Amino acid sequence: MESETPANALSSGQRRYLRSLAHPLAPMVFIGKDGLTDNLLASIEDALNAHELIKVKLGPNCPLDKKSASLVVPQKSKSELVQLIGKILLIYRQNPELKEKSKINLPKK
């Protein structure tokens, strides 16, 4: 049985691969003036379960700065920060229910 990728365990090659997959993606979740609410975290959870790799955009009125958001969002969503560009976070989490049929097959470390 393969072990799950724990947080902060993506190699640079895996990050590069995920960045290449994310290039054409549009942000799926927007953090607005209310910040990280329970509903927003549920939206992130749903998007990660469906797609595994998503972009989260910080709106102009977001109470979080990009550095704190890059720490808090992955922690609360139990995902891995792949990249932070401007006000867009790229996060990844393998869907445990689709482990054998995962949409994204990471290269070996």
Image (cartoon, grey):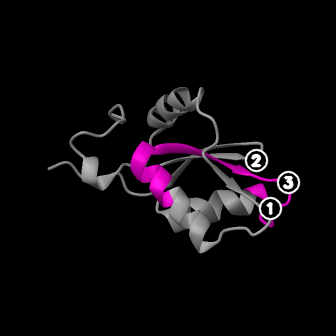
Cβ atoms under marks 3 and 2 closer than 8 Å:
no
Could you say which is closer to the camera, residue 6 or residue 30?
30
Which residues lie in the magenta part? 45-66
| Figure quadrant of residue 26 | top right
* Residue 107 figure quarter: top left
Badge nearest the viewer, 3 or 2: 3
Query: Which residue was labeled with disc 1?
Result: 62
- The residue under the point 46% across, 56% down is 46
Residue 21 as seen in the image, left or right of residue 97:
right
Indicate left or right for 100 with 104 as reference: left
Is 87 placed left or right of 24 in the picture? right
User: Mark 3 vs mark 2: which is more N-terminal?
Assistant: 3
Q: CA distance from mark 1 to mark 3?
A: 6 Å
Where residue 64 appears, as percent x and y from the top left, is 77, 64
Near-viewer residue (12 or 95): 95
- Amino acid under disc 2: Lys
Q: Which residue is mark 2?
A: 87
Tell me the number on the disc at residue 60: 3
Q: Residues within 10 Å of mark 2 (few under 14, many from 20)?
A: some
State the image coordinates of residue 102 (x, y, percent, origin top left): 30, 40
Q: Position of residue 69 (x, y in %)?
A: 69, 60
Q: Residues within 10 Å of mark 3 (few under 14, many from 20)?
A: few
